[in-house]
Image (cartoon, rainbow, N blue to C red):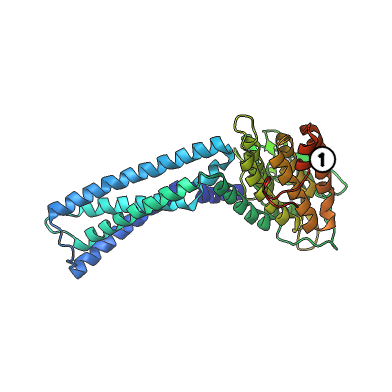
């Protein structure tokens, strides 16, 4: 099994609803005989159900659990559609990966299966403990259903979804860039050159899609086995079509192109796991849609800028990856491209500045964001931020014909309009 296949299995287990439902069903099929055996051993008699009464209540509860499962799935799909329409389609995967959805679905599936198993065992003698556990489980699921409905409705709020994206993004940034930024240790180039010598290109084979993740350790191991250096051409998040160059390989010994291919996971949609830029892409898309003429909601754009400011501050205090992997002897074995600090700043700010031109609220929040980053981050991080400030000044000059509006738009405000200056 290649690394890509293992990664896909891990991704499916993390994001899919099916494994949770299957595990819940299997757990119920194991738990039901165990409780029935305990009932037979203890002769439990507390509730005193009659056979007809037990059948009636278990049949009703089983029907209600099936209805709850259908409602949970339907409500989740509705939330996904609303979130995609109001914010961005790129939050769909996040909604399905919410623990709230998976745990609720698993609990309802477990309870339904257990209830049916208990119903099938009601004969002349009622397994009192068995039936009692089924009733308690159903009552607990009713309470859990109300909790699910309340929390899912809260997830529709843009602030909640933006906080979810930013929280995931902060974890991704900490994982991809684990080292703190040290001004005394300048960051190197984002793509080191290959050594001199013959170089051949390994084409990409497989369906078209975006690079989801790369195992640099496996890539270095494959290169080390052939005493070669492998340069990965696309970056995480780039689109690949069949036949596109996947890797440039420098070395005298033959290297298995399939082994290199197995170190790269490609899929239909970008994910957050190794792609910090995708975090900013989602937040920027939410702001862009809020600033569209059809929606015209600059307050939501400001909420997105709040999270962008927090992530840029977090990212700017970390050492960015230089895209080089060495073996135990210190020899370079894998080289790959990585985004640098100006890339992140441009992605996070430029489109919102463009689409928010003419909005005092957005211009003031953008200025406060840039001023705050300049105050808090090391001097080496300042040039792209100051460049964005210059572009923002020009946008304000173009966007407002009235001098008073230009003065107001040229003031930094953490709330956009109504907050403290600076």
Secondary structure type for disc 1: helix
Q: Is residue 279 visible?
A: yes
Towards the viewer: 277 or 32: 277
Residue 118 locus on image (x, y percent): 23, 55
Residue lying furthest front in this view? Answer: 404
Which x, y percent locates residue 81? 50, 36
Point 25% across, 57% down: residue: 135
Looking at the image, residue 124 sits to the left or right of residue 343; the answer is: left
Please identify the residue farthest to the right as the structure is shown: 196
Please count the marks in the image. Answer: 1
Residue 169 place in picture, x, y as percent: 63, 51
Question: Which of 403/28 is in front?
Answer: 403
- x, y percent for residue 311: 68, 52
Near-viewer residue (20 or 78) = 78
User: From this viewpoint, which residue is outermost toward the bottom?
Assistant: 42
Horizontally, residue 134 falls left or right of residue 403, namely left
The quarter holding residue 199 reads top right
**Which of the 4 quarters of the picture holds residue 295?**
top right
Taking 19 as reference, is 133 above or below it?
below
Q: Residue at x 34, y 45 (%)?
A: 68
In this rendering, would 113 be left or right of 6? left
* Mark 1 Cα-neighbour bin, 10 Å: few <14, some 14–19, many ≥20: some
Which residue sits at x=22%, y=63%?
A: 129
Residue drawn 53% across the image and 45% down it: 157
| Residue corresponding to mark 1 | 393
Where residue 286 sits, quadrant-wise, is: top right
Front-most of 56 and 255? 56
Residue 2 visible in the picture: no
């Amino acid at each position: 099994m290649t690394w890509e296949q293992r990664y896909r299995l891990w991704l499916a287990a993390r994001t899919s609803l099916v494994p949770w439902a299957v595990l819940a069903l299997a757990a119920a099929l194991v738990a039901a005989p165990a409780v029935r055996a305990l009932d037979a051993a203890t002769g439990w008699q507390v509730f005193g159900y009659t056979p007809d009464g037990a059948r009636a209540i278990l049949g009703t509860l089983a029907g209600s659990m099936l209805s709850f499962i259908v409602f949970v799935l339907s409500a989740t799909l509705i939330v996904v559609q609303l979130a995609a329409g109001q914010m961005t389609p790129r939050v769909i995967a996040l909604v399905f990966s919410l623990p709230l959805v998976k745990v609720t679905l698993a609990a309802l599936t477990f309870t339904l299966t257990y209830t049916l198993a208990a119903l099938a065992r009601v004969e002349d003698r009622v397994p009192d403990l068995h039936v009692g556990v089924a009733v308690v489980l159903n009552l607990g699921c009713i309470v859990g259903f109300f909790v699910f409905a309340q929390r899912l409705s809260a997830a529709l709020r843009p602030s909640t979804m933006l906080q979810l994206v930013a929280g995931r993004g902060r974890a991704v940034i900490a994982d991809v860039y684990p080292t703190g930024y040290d001004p005394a240790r300048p960051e190197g180039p984002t793509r080191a050159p290959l050594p001199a010598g013959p170089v051949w290109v390994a084409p990409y084979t497989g369906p078209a899609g975006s690079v989801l993740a790369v195992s640099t350790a496996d890539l270095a191991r494959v290169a080390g086995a052939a005493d070669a250096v492998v340069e990965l051409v696309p970056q995480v998040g780039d689109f690949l079509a069949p036949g596109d160059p996947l890797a440039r390989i420098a070395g005298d010994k033959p290297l298995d192109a399939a082994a290199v291919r197995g170190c790269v996971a490609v899929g239909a949609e970008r994910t957050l796991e190794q792609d910090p830029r995708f975090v900013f892409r989602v937040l920027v898309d939410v702001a862009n849609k809020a600033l569209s003429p059809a929606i015209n909601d600059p307050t939501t754009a400001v909420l997105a800028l709040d999270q962008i400011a927090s992530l840029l501050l977090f990212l700017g205090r970390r050492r960015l990856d230089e895209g080089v992997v060495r073996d135990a002897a210190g020899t370079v074995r894998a080289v790959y491209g990585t985004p640098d600090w100006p890339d992140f700043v441009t992605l996070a700010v430029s489109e919102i500045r463009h689409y928010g031109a003419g909005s005092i609220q957005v211009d003031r929040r953008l200025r406060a964001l840039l001023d705050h980053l300049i105050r808090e981050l090391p001097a080496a991080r300042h040039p792209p931020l100051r460049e964005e400030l210059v572009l923002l000044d020009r946008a304000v000059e173009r966007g407002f014909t009235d001098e008073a509006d230009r003065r107001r738009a040229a003031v930094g405000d953490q709330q956009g309009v109504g907050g403290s200056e600076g």
